[in-house]
Image: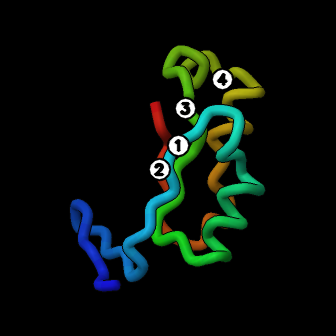
Amino acid sequence: MRPIDLGGVRLETPVILAPMSGVTDLPFRRLARKLGAGLVVSEMIASWAMVRENDTTLRMAEVADAGGPALLHN
């Protein structure tokens, strides 16, 4: 597989993890990255919950130790 460029971000492995509510939590994203995903995406997150700093939502949005490109899905 050839690398792809997305808005100036180069993905050496052109495999992107789809955002799935209730599935793509931080441990799952870490596993996907370990198995070779070039880009990982968070669960679907409500903007209003981020603005209000909802604890559950902030945990869903965590990207610590992503090991590469990561997106928050809104």
| Residues at marks 3 and 2 touching, judged by CB atoms closer than 8 Å | no
Image coordinates of residue 30 in percent, x first then y, are 70, 64
Residue at (72% x, 52% y) in the render: 26
The disc at residue 53 is 4
Nearest to the eye among marks 1 and 2: give it.
1
Q: Look at label 2 and name its amino acid.
A: Leu
Q: Secondary structure at mark 3?
A: strand
Tell me which residue sits at (26%, 63%) in the image: 6
Q: Are marks 3 and 1 in contact (CB under 8 Å)?
A: yes
Of mark 3 and mark 2, the one earlier in the sequence is 3
Distance from label 4 to label 2 (Cα)? 18 Å
Q: Which residue is depicted at the point 66% across and 58% down?
A: 29
As displayed, is residue 13 above or below residue 51?
below
Neighbor class of circle 2 (other Cα within 10 Å; few <14, some 14-19, many 20+) is some
| Location of mark 1 (residue) | 19
**Picture coordinates of residue 52, whole percent (x, y):** 61, 16
Across and down, in percent, residue 4 comes to 27, 74
SS for callout 2: strand
Q: Secondary structure beneath disc 4?
A: loop
Tell me, what colour scheme is on the image? rainbow
Residue picked out by circle 2: 71
Q: Quadrant of residue 56?
A: top right
Tag count in the figure? 4
